[in-house]
Structure formats: C-alpha cells, structure tokens
Image (tube, rainbow, N blue to C red):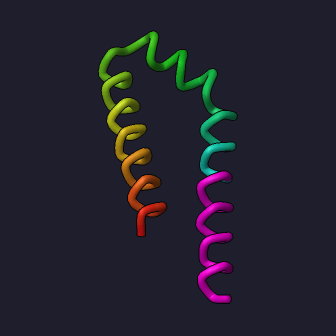
Amino acid sequence: MGEKILSLFKFRWQSEVLLIFVGLLPFILLLLLANPFWMRVTFSLLIIYGLGSLASTMI
C-alpha cells in the first residue's frame, strides 16, 4: 500500500513539473533563439530530467 502511494506521489510531482515546463515553453523558446548559451543549458537540463525520470521508473 505504501508503494502505491509513493508511486502516485512521484507521478504527480513529474506531471506538475511537466505542466510548469509547458507553461513556460514560449518564454524558454524565446530565450533559446536569443542566446545559444541558454540553448545548451536548457538542453542539458532536459537530458538530466529525462535520465532522472527514467531512473525513477526503473527503481
């Protein structure tokens, strides 16, 4: 039972982060077009987030 609650919490946390990211997407795209440095930073953060979510589903 505890594992089900924990998995629900993980899913909610990831979906909230995804919603925030989608809401900020237009501003992020403007930043990326304006400055290549931020494009690299954002790409790195997306890779880290993707690897983290992949690792959390494997555990």
Residue 23 vs 38, above or below: the answer is below
Q: 12 or 33, which is in the foreground?
A: 12
Q: Quadrant of the N terminus?
A: bottom right
Q: Is residue 46 left or right of residue 40?
A: right
Q: How many marks?
A: 0
Q: Residue at x 68, y 43 (%)?
A: 19
Q: Is residue 27 left or right of residue 57?
A: right
Residue found at the far top of this picture: 33
* Residue span colored magenta: 1-15
Residue found at the far bottom of this picture: 1
> How far from the left and from the top, in percent, is residue 56?
45, 63
* Location of residue 45 (image quadrant): top left
Residue 1 vs 27, above or below: the answer is below
> How far from the left and from the top, in percent, is residue 25?
61, 27
> How far from the left and from the top, in percent, is residue 47?
36, 39
Q: Quadrant of the C terminus?
A: bottom left
> How far from the left and from the top, in percent, is residue 31?
48, 19
Q: 20 or 57, which is in the foreground?
A: 57
Confirm whether the magenta stretch covers residue 7.
yes
Q: Does the magenta stretch mainly form a helix, a strand or a loop?
A: helix
Q: Is residue 49 left or right of residue 21?
A: left
Residue 26 vs 1, above or below: the answer is above
Q: Residue at x 63, y 32 (%)?
A: 24
Q: Residue at x 54, y 15 (%)?
A: 30
Confirm whether the magenta stretch covers residue 43.
no
Q: 26 or 53, which is in the foreground?
A: 53
